[in-house]
């Protein structure tokens, strides 16, 4: 149960195809997050956010938050509410899913100065997609945390073919806790810094 000072995080489900595996790690992350008192976790399922393939006349980094498409404006408003993010990261051809990259590209200031952690899966635990996503996150002025969950081939096949659950692999739960802890540390530090900067700006105005 979250306390009143809890950070507000979102879990972005980063693939949208039918039969996606993403629901398995998303549920497993959400279940563990519900036990935490230091943050809350809301789900942002990209299936519920049918964003246009990037169509804005100006880069979000230069638009100052002025987005012409209402669907984009809604996404921007939703992203702005959160203190940090976790994204499920499927690996498609050694990179992130296009739908997740598009969702990241579609906002800018709303991502700035917030932490993000990744739950990768695939043949090598989504490691290649996660590494690319970390570089994208830096460009969005985010703080990608060092710890991540990497669900490799064995647990993926265990779940898909042999009736296993992710909880049958204790090293995954250890990574999940470490990622949560790092998100809370960075989330608190950056929230404080954002608030201090906003106050200084208000005083100077
Ligand atoms: C277009 C496409 C490309 C893929 N490329 C990779 C890859 O490069 N590396 C990998 O480990 N798995 C790859 N896979 C397998 C995915 O890891 C696997 O299908 C996973 O379930 C995809 O996540 P999703 O089910 O949430 O969409 C690929 C799957 C698709 C559909």
Image (cartoon, helix red, strand yellow):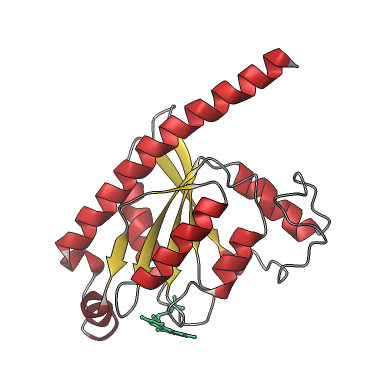
Q: Residue furthest top?
A: 203
Q: Position of residue 193 (x, y in %)?
A: 51, 27
Q: Residue at x 25, y 80 (%)?
A: 153
Between 81 and 113, which is closer to the camera in this rendering?
A: 113
Between 72 and 114, which is closer to the camera in this rendering?
A: 114
As drawn, 125 above or below 195? below
Q: Taking the image as four quarters, which one is ligand 1 found in?
A: bottom left
**In the figure, residue 57 lies in which quadrant?**
bottom right
Q: Residue at x 28, y 54 (%)?
A: 176
As drawn, 134 above or below 102? above
Q: Position of residue 5 (x, y in %)?
A: 43, 27
As drawn, 93 above or below 204? below
Q: Residue at x 65, y 50 (%)?
A: 108
Instruction: State left or right for residue 49 relative to residue 57.
Output: left
**In the figure, residue 105 lies in which quadrant?**
bottom right
Can residue 35 be spotted in the picture? no
Q: Residue at x 43, y 73 (%)?
A: 90
Between 52 and 144, which is closer to the camera in this rendering?
A: 144
Q: Quadrant of the C terminus?
A: top right
Can residue 25 be spotted in the picture? yes
Q: Position of residue 34 (x, y in %)?
A: 35, 47
**In the figure, residue 46 lies in which quadrant?**
bottom right
Q: Position of residue 154 (x, y in %)?
A: 21, 79
Instruction: State left or right for residue 1 relative to residue 136.
Output: left
Q: Quadrant of the N terminus?
A: top left
């Amino acid at each position: 149960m979250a306390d009143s000072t809890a950070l507000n995080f979102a879990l972005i489900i980063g693939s949208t195809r039918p039969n996606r595996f993403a629901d398995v790690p998303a549920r497993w992350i959400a279940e563990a997050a519900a036990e935490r008192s230091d943050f809350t976790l809301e789900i942002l399922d990209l299936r519920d956010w049918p964003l246009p393939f990037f169509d804005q006349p100006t880069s979000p980094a230069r638009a100052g938050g002025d987005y012409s498409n209402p669907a984009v404006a809604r996404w921007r408003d939703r992203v702005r509410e959160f203190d940090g993010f976790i994204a499920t990261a499927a690996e498609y051809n050694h990179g992130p899913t296009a739908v997740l990259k598009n969702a990241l590209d579609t906002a800018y200031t709303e991502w700035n100065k917030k932490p993000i952690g990744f739950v990768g899966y695939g043949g090598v635990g989504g490691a290649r997609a996660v590494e690319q996503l970390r570089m994208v996150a830096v460009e969005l002025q985010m703080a990608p945390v060092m710890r991540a969950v990497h669900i490799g081939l064995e647990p993926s096949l265990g779940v898909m073919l042999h009736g296993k659950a992710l909880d049958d692999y204790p090293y995954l739960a250890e990574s999940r806790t470490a990622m949560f802890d790092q998100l809370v540390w960075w989330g608190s530090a950056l929230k404080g810094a954002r608030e201090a900067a906003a106050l200084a700006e208000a005083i100077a105005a």
